[in-house]
Image: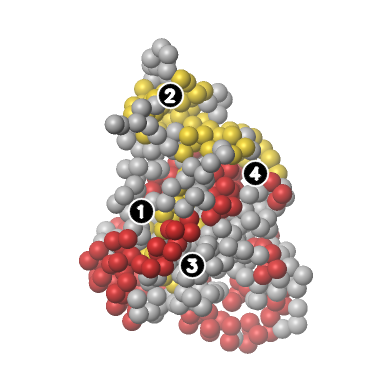
Amino acid sequence: MNPPSYSFVARGRRVVLPDGERAAAIHIRDGVIAAITGFDEVRPGVDVIEAGDAVVLAGLVDTHVHINEPGRTDWEGFSTATQAAAAGGITTLIEMPLNSIPATTTAAAYRQKTESAEGKLSVDVGFWGGVVPGNVAELAPLWEAGAFGFKCFLVSSGVDEFKSVNETDLRAALPELARLDAPLLVHAELPNPIEAAMQSAKFRQASAGGGAKKYATWLASRPRAAENEAIALLIHLSGEFGAPVHIVHLSSSDSVALIQKAKQRGARVTVETCPHYLTFAAGEISDAATEFKCAPPIRERENREQLWAALGDGTIDLVATDHSPCPPSMKLQHEGDFLRAWGGIASLQLSLPGVWTEARRRGYALSDIARWMCSAPAKLARIEKRKGSIAVGCDADFIFFNPDAQWRVAPERLYHRHKMTPYAGRELTGAIEATFLRGRKIFDHGEFSDAAAGRVLRRGHL
């Protein structure tokens, strides 16, 4: 016998739909959007949830998150990360294959990962697999097990369990990825320009004495050339093998023209950037403020504005957090050493208001946010038929968002395991009032539902 169906309506005067923003009623049956009608087209007797003055926006999809469980759960963990996501209006996460132990580079490690997630999720979570030297034979088993695609590093990842690959390794893996038609996500920095920069007399002089406390020293150690040359290589290899390639966390605006030309030729290349590259600028970062350290680095103000332009014209497809937390001691704040501190920024809960604050200043609309942070990430993971849009047939994942609320980031109000973030004390615009996952309210003005409502997502079995 089928379980009894449950129907209700969520409606608002401002609902951001794929074809624009308008007043609408969202009809939900058993956690799925069954119909979208005019605001007043509601049958008598049906339960109605009113958005009031809030905007109704699709639940965000974040395809670049490091949760670190199992193995480094003291860095983050499924419970804390997914609570932070729910509080930030994110209803779907696709987690990276590192920094957990084991890394998700085998089908056995994938099973261990999914087992460790069960019962701990406030939002839905899927997983990328990893490409490392020598694991080509594991790619098809990972794909069949449910991984949504694969991630690799062209430069050291910072952890021993996830080795970087070179061009030879890519040439071994790409034919298999092309056969599977599986996307390859790439940390696009090449080591040679970095090594050359750090061996230069200018860099050695800058880093001597207390120079490692200056952000400019860290910036000089990761030159734009490392990204630019890596992206040129990836565009070439994508074309040679016919494999889809996604550039994660673009920070160098120098690569924008190259990416534009590749897309005009029909290259199977997509690109993301991150909230921190769209928010901060190198010249504003104080000495010893290692909470800002990430790789690639936050660059100059003009670089930031060029990234915004590329996002606005579609050259950059989407925004993802690259939430990469660690215990605060690893940030070495007492020493302020940018060269030795862990590189990673915690921002999962803050991504929507962070990006909206900057987007609004530049004249963008919430429909742009929906494209960059909802539908485009869902398309990358190929889950767009169920996630990332308020559309018939999609899961009823949506949020009530106050786009005008202004507030200051207080670390103690964050749900990440560790509260260190470069956003601390920053005034942001936009507040998440409520978050719904498959029609269930999981977050409401600072309160969470009692049970873990999230599910493990597997490719082909949503």
Mark 4 near mark 3, Cβ–Cβ under 8 Å? no
Distance of label 3 from label 1 (alpha carbons) = 18 Å
Tag count in the figure? 4
Residue 183 or residue 280, whichever sits in front: 183
Residue 83 or residue 37, whichever sits in front: 83
Q: Amino acid at mark 1?
A: Arg
Estimate how packed mark 4 is, as few (under 14), some (14 to 19) or many (20 or more) residues with alpha carbons within 10 Å.
many
Distance of label 4 from label 2 (alpha carbons) = 31 Å
Q: Which residue is mark 1?
A: 458
Q: Which numbered disc, 3 or 1, marks the residue that appears first in the sequence?
A: 3
Q: Which residue is mark 3?
A: 98
Q: Which residue is mark 4?
A: 428
Mark 4 near mark 1, Cβ–Cβ under 8 Å? no
> What's the colour scheme?
secondary structure
Query: Of discs 4 and 3, which sits in the foreground?
Result: 3
Residue 79 image position (x, y, % from top left): 56, 52
Q: Which residue is mark 2?
A: 9
Query: Of discs 2 and 1, which sits in the foreground?
Result: 1
